[in-house]
Image: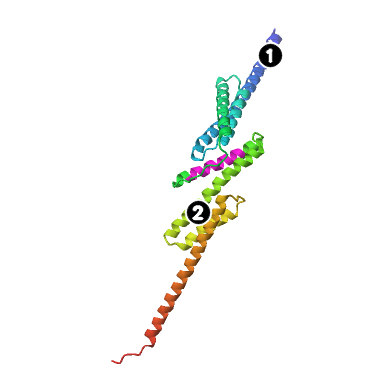
Amino acid sequence: MIAIIVGLIVALIIFVVVINAIQQHKEKVEAEKRAKVAKQKAIIDETEELIMMMAMLPDNPAMVEILTRRSLNAAKAMLQIMPEVKASKQKVQEFESRLKASADMAANSSNKEEQFTLPDNEQQLVQILQCIKKLRVTLKSEQTKGALDAQVFVKQDARLDGMQLKINIESLLKRGNQAYSKEMLGSARQYYEKALQTIGNTSNQSEYVRSKKEEIEDKLEQITAELKNTNAKDAAKKAKSEEDDLDVLFQPKKKW
């Protein structure tokens, strides 16, 4: 009888241990699923934020299509991980509809790039730069994953690079012009030289880049001429001052 009782106790302990192990494994699997779902949700949230930030940039339906497809892929991954969640299925349907709309817009849009006018507000300019940098990182990530065609990546990245280059050049030109208007020729020359160096470091040879290069070179020549003129005037003024000092020194002394 004692042996039976001991056997039952041992069996019960083994049963409890097995049940706990199964429960722990189940909880671990569920935790891993939730972590994977959270990762995909973060991708969707980040992508939606990027699409909203693109309102500061010229219209680019092709880029919106790329980002919408990224969100759709993340929603599909969420549905595959946890198919029992109805919200995931609704998200997939939503992004499929949005992808179709953005694809239609991209197909009907003009290939001509719109004029990109920079805002005067420095804070908005910083936000635009942040948006462009995030978009370029996202493009590279999608291309690395094989979710984006290489030619599409090159085209869109070049467009964003052109915008980023324009912001850098225009910002330096603006600071240079402000310094020049205040007759701070040395500071103005530094800004213009930095802008010219920025142009020299890029492989972008668009009409905008060529025209800005000519404009900056003209400004630097103008500053060089003005500095030479100023130096000549200073030298003449200094010579005249020294001449006056000599006249005073060697003039006949008065007798008292």
Residue under the image location 47 percent in, 71 percent down: 231
Q: In which quarter of the image is the C terminus?
A: bottom left
Q: Residue reaching furthest top?
A: 1
- Estimate the spatial distance between the alpha carbons at disc 1 and disc 2, rounded to whole Å: 80 Å
Q: Which element carries disc 1, helix, strand or loop?
A: helix
Badge number at residue 172: 2
Q: Which residue lies furthest to the right in this view?
A: 3
Residue 92 coordinates in the image, percent (x, y): 58, 24
x, y (%) of residue 228? 49, 69
At numbered mark 2, what does the secondary structure look like: helix, strand or loop? helix
Mark 1, other Cα within 10 Å: few <14 / some 14–19 / many ≥20: few
Q: Which residue is depicted at the point 49% across and 51% down?
A: 171
Q: Between residues 253 and 96, which one lies in front from this camera angle?
A: 96
Q: Where is residue 110 in the image (x, y as percent from the top left)?
A: 56, 37
Which quadrant of the figure has residue 198?
Answer: bottom right
Magenta-colored stretch includes residue 136: yes
Give the vertical position of 245 relative to 8 (above or below).
Answer: below
Q: Most extreme residue toward the left, as rendered?
A: 256
How would you classify the magenta stretch by its main secondary structure?
A: helix
For the rendered model, the colour scheme is rainbow
Which residue is more in the foreground, 205 or 22? 205
Q: In this view, does 150 lie to the left or right of 182?
A: right
Q: Mark 1 points at which residue?
A: 11
Quarter placement of the N terminus: top right
Q: Where is residue 129 in the image (x, y as percent from the top left)?
A: 52, 44
Q: Residue at x 65, y 21 (%)?
A: 21
Establish if 198 lies above or below 77: below
Disc 2 marks a residue whose amino acid type is Leu
* Residue 17: in magenta span: no
Q: Give the range drawn in magenta.
A: 125-139
